[in-house]
Image (tube, rainbow, N blue to C red):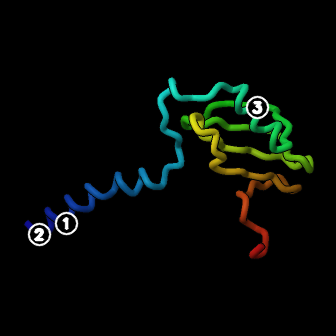
Amino acid sequence: MRLALTILACVAVLPVGQALADDDCFAPMADWKPKEAVAALAARNGWTVRRIKIDDGCYEIDGTDAEGQRIEVTVHPSTLDVIEIERKDGTGHRRRDGEGRGGE
């Protein structure tokens, strides 16, 4: 009986851990800002947009930053908050902001 309760407790907690690990955007389509607003956000930040697409319920900007470095920016569709910026370095590897900077 104790083993069954332990297994049940583990199974019940597993989906919660997966949900917390997700960085998907959850917003009703009626609350989404238009792609033009995302393009304006990019322009304000000095980014050149190659493409704006929807991925995992978020807007994703593929383009370059003001220094000409390739970037991929994840934006919340209703708040237009920047969730993540990934940069491609000269070797073609991706890194998220804050990674690989030697503690800066």
Dot 2 amino acid type: Arg
The answer to whether residue 85 is left or right of residue 63 is left
The alpha-carbon separation of the residues under discs 3 and 2 comes to 56 Å
> Exactly how many numbered labels are in the figure?
3
| Residue bearing the label numbered 3 | 39
Residue 30 appears left or right of 44: left
Disc 2: which residue? 2
Q: Residue 2: where, in percent of width, then height?
A: 11, 69
Judging from the image, what secondary structure is the residue with disc 3 in?
Answer: helix
Q: Circle 1 is placed at which residue position?
A: 6
What's under tag 1, amino acid-wise?
A: Thr
Label 2 with label 1: CB-CB less than 8 Å:
yes
Q: Residue furthest left?
A: 1
Question: Is disc 3 surrounded by few (<14), some (14 to 19) or many (20+) residues within 10 Å?
Answer: some
Residue at horizontal 66%, vertical 43%?
A: 74
| Left or right for 2, reference 40 | left
Where is residue 9? Give x, y as percent: 22, 61
Q: Nearer the viewer, residue 77 or 8?
A: 77
Instruction: Give the foreground label among 3 and 1.
Output: 3
